[in-house]
Amino acid sequence: MCNVEVIEFFIENVEIEEFEGKRVLEVGSKYINGSIRPFIERFMKPKEYIGVDIEPGRFVDVILPAERLVEYFGEESFDVVISTELLEHVRDWRLVVDNMKKVLKRGGYIYITTRSRGFPYHGYPYDFWSYELEDMVKIFSDFKIVCLKRDPSMPGVFIKARKPEDWRPIKLSDIALYSMILGKRMTKCPNINDMPIYQKAMLHLILIIRYMGSQIITLLSE
């Protein structure tokens, strides 16, 4: 999902010198109801724009889990890292955030949008976490936060932060996030089997709808 507010956040906060002639990585880049990529490529003129996702699709250049960014690209290999509407869906959010921080060059910028408590469960296929403003302050206390705001139209947070030249990673293990599975703050991700029955039913319904949708698309394309 890339709603109008997400796109406006980028329009209001990107600077051409951050992107022009630079390498850009988008984590979770598959096109689903919108993308910021066409705007960045057309108006910010990056040297290279690479999109990674766990499954193929439009705007996906490399099929790769976010937990393996450093292993695949190496540390400090991108000038800008972008992630829209991904972090709530990854089980090990610490490992993913750590990878995004490490592949970013010192002095580079990271842009993240994600959902907060109050946004309905939206598994793709899972929905693990909700992030608040105070969570982002803790998670990116080793970066310089340039802009941090709520999504004005629905529960969510947007952040733009800069990696300092003297960056030293902080410890993330003590940060507790709100679990969409158990409905309380936790430092560890609970097992899917611990999910309440109504959420399990919702998850199964979502998977069935996705499967039926893919079958219809396949039939129409034949």
Image: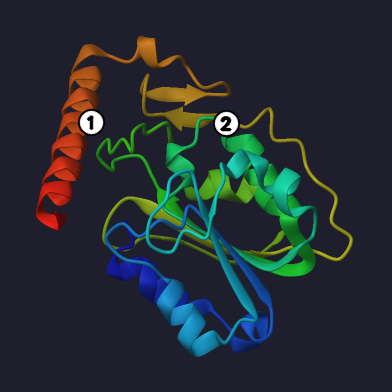
Task: Examine the rendered structure and indicate whether residue 77 appears above or below residue 22.
Answer: above
Image position of 81 (left or right of 218): right
Label 2 with label 1: CB-CB less than 8 Å: no
Residue sitting at x 35%, y 60%: 31
Q: Is residue 186 visible?
A: yes
Instruction: Judge the density around disc 1: few (<14), some (14-19), many (≥20) Cα neighbours within 10 Å.
Output: some
- Identify the mark at residue 92; answer none if there is no mark: 2
Which residue carries the number 1 mark?
A: 207
Q: How many marks?
A: 2
| Crowd class of label 2 (few under 14; some 14 to 19; many from 20; radius 10 Å) | some
Q: Mark yes or no: residue 130 visible.
A: no
* Rendered location of residue 91, percent (x, y): 51, 30
Point out the image quarter for the N terminus.
Answer: bottom left
State the residue at coordinates (24%, 26%). 203
- The furthest residue to the right: 166
In terms of depth relative to the viewer, which is nearer, 222 or 8? 222
- Residue flagged by tag 1: what amino acid is it? Leu
